[in-house]
Amino acid sequence: MEVVGVSAIGRRALAALSASGGTARVMAPLSTSVYLVAGAEIVWLGARASALHPRAIVCDAGWRPGEAGGPGAPVRVRAWPEAPWLPAAVPRGGGATLARSARGLVAAVPRLGRPDGFGALLVGARPPFPLDGATGPARALARACERGDPWGAARAARRLLGLGAGLTPSGDDFVGAAFFARALLTSAASPDAVEWRREAETIRDAAHGRTHPISAALLGDLLTGEGPAPLHDLARALAGAAPEAQALEAAERLVSLGHCSGWDMLAGFAAGAGALQLVE
């Protein structure tokens, strides 16, 4: 299959296609997108409405996922933008504001609809099977983040890896978003940031062999503070004390991702920001 029109591309996808000369192979075709392997990197093709992400290749209107073929089929991307999509930076020094605003967001979660996956924790409900048996480590992760304990957070996080169905299990999304929040909350040069990064690496290492390679790649991105555009937009709105409507709009786009991936990430983000314990 040849892909001619690419309207936007993430930085990891850009680097992968540049290195491979635009060639890739289908890894996993889905209903609205296709995961590819370009060189050694996992990337994906999606329609214009797809959420931007460092690994995303957003195609122009008219592209159909079914045209890509099955696993192993070759894909050729003819041209792509020279500059990658980059998320807007979180305001400098906005960590305290982000944590405070996240508490207000949790209180407004019922306005987003009925939570799914680990999102049930946001309203004090029990997640569906098989996540219902993992509320203990999920809460432990949230408490460790609230008290600034990277070792305790990583210990709880490892118990959640690979938990759930699909290519991106709920446990991975929850853990990744929690550490995404921590990456934003800690100053890059602080001793705390060094400890959080060290523990994030232990999670990245533990994920290999315990979850799907696609999820391991996306989890690795979240652990370093890279994720889908709605998650970045939400963090920026909260850190910048934006109007509640702006934060809720970003949260609404986030929870629309996947079957329940967006809800899992929203709950994980709240846990990482120290807000999830408010609904225990």
Image (cartoon, grey):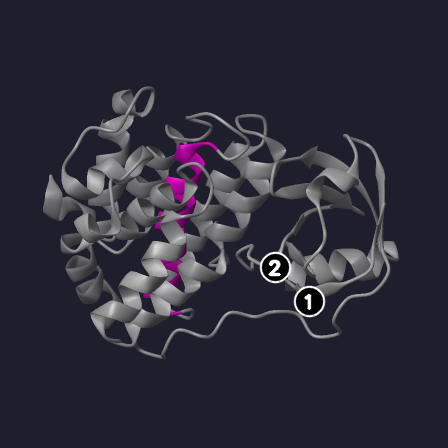
Q: Which residue is mark 2?
A: 48
Q: Which residue is mark 1?
A: 7
Whether residue 4 sits left or right of residue 101 in the image: it is right
Of residues 120 and 253, the one nearer the viewer is 253
Label 2 packing within 10 angstroms: few (<14), some (14-19), many (20+): some
Percent position of residue 175, x then y = 39, 41
Residue 231, by quadrant, is bottom left
Percent position of residue 4, x then y = 82, 60
Q: Quadrant of the N terminus?
A: top right
Of residues 101 and 33, the one nearer the viewer is 33
Question: What kind of residue is marked 2?
Answer: Arg
What residue is drawn where x is 42% and y is 26%?
A: 164
Give the mark nearer the N terminus: 1 vs 2: 1
Whether residue 142 sits left or right of residue 67 in the image: it is left
Residue stretch in magenta: 169-187
Residue 140 in sight: no
Vertical relation: 62 (above or below) 68: below
User: SS at mark 1?
Assistant: strand
Vertical relation: 209 (above or below) 237: above
Residue 102, by quadrant, is bottom left
Percent position of residue 84, x then y = 66, 70
Residue 247, by quadrant, is bottom left
Task: Give me the disc on residue 170.
Answer: none
Percent position of residue 176, x then y = 43, 46
What residue is drawn where x is 35% and y is 65%?
A: 235
Residue 157 in sight: yes
Whether residue 201 sits left or right of residue 94 in the image: it is right
Task: Determine the residue located farthest toward the bottom in the rendered image.
Answer: 92
Q: What main secondary structure does the magenta stretch of the protein show?
A: helix
